[in-house]
Amino acid sequence: MENRADFAANLKLSGKYNCAQAVCIALKDETNLEEEILANIASGFCAGMGNMEATCGALIGVNIILGLHLEGKATLRYSRELIEKFKARCGATKCRDLKTLTNGRPLCPCEECVRNAVLIYEEIKNNF
């Protein structure tokens, strides 16, 4: 759903939410949790898992939603698929690698990681 992906990207661009929060809030209807609770859950997963430049926050956020939506059932199977598709689309899964500049541009800007995470979730959701 392109609108939801754009909404997530705009949440990130607003500066009010980190990548994980933007994804979680954009996909909140996939859970039974309120926006504030999802934002709190995802608050520490920015800049690559607690500012350590590790796993991308958008990828963590979408995995949070995946686990909540599936209630833990078959989450690992779909998580792996989501991660593989994210890597294929964005070029990496680690924040440090995604932000590395080549010719003055990052491999995949944060708002595009957020957008892609939501789009991939929508793609694989049909297989649940």
Image (cartoon, helix red, strand yellow):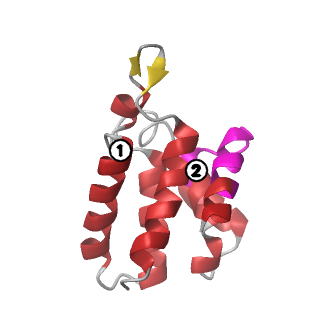
User: In the rendered view, would you say 45 is above or below 102?
Assistant: below
State the residue position of label 1.
55
The residue depicted at 65 percent of the width and 44 percent of the height is 12
Left or right of 40: which side holds 97? left
SS of the residue under disc 1: loop
- Residue 14 shown left or right of residue 126 in the figure: right
User: Given the image, on which type of amino acid does mark 1 rest?
Assistant: Thr
Looking at the rendered structure, the secondary structure element under dot 2 is loop
Q: Which residues are magenta?
A: 7-20
Q: Is residue 8 magenta?
A: yes
- What amino acid is labelled 2 in the image? Ser
Report x, y in % for residue 22: 62, 53
Residue 6 image point, x, y percent: 66, 54
Which tag is nearer the camera, tag 1 or tag 2?
1
For marks 1 and 2 on the same chain, the one whose residue lies earlier in the sequence = 2
Residue sitting nearer the eye, 105 or 13: 105
State whether residue 13 is above or below residue 65: above
Where residue 43 is drawn, which disc sits there? 2
**Magenta segment includes 38:** no
Q: Does residue 7 appear to the left or right of 82 in the view shown?
A: right
Quadrant position of the C terminus in the picture? bottom left
Return the residue nearer the eye: 93 or 60: 93
Image height of 9 relative to 3, above or below: above
Pointer 2 local density, CA inside 10 Å: few below 14, some 14–19, many at least 20: some
Residue displayed at 33% across by 44% down: 93
Q: CA distance from mark 1 to mark 2?
A: 14 Å
Res 110 visible: yes
Is label 1 in contact with label 2 (beta carbons under 8 Å)?
no
Most distant residue in the top direction: 103
What secondary structure is the stretch in magenta mostly built from? Answer: helix
Closest to the observer, 49 or 23? 23
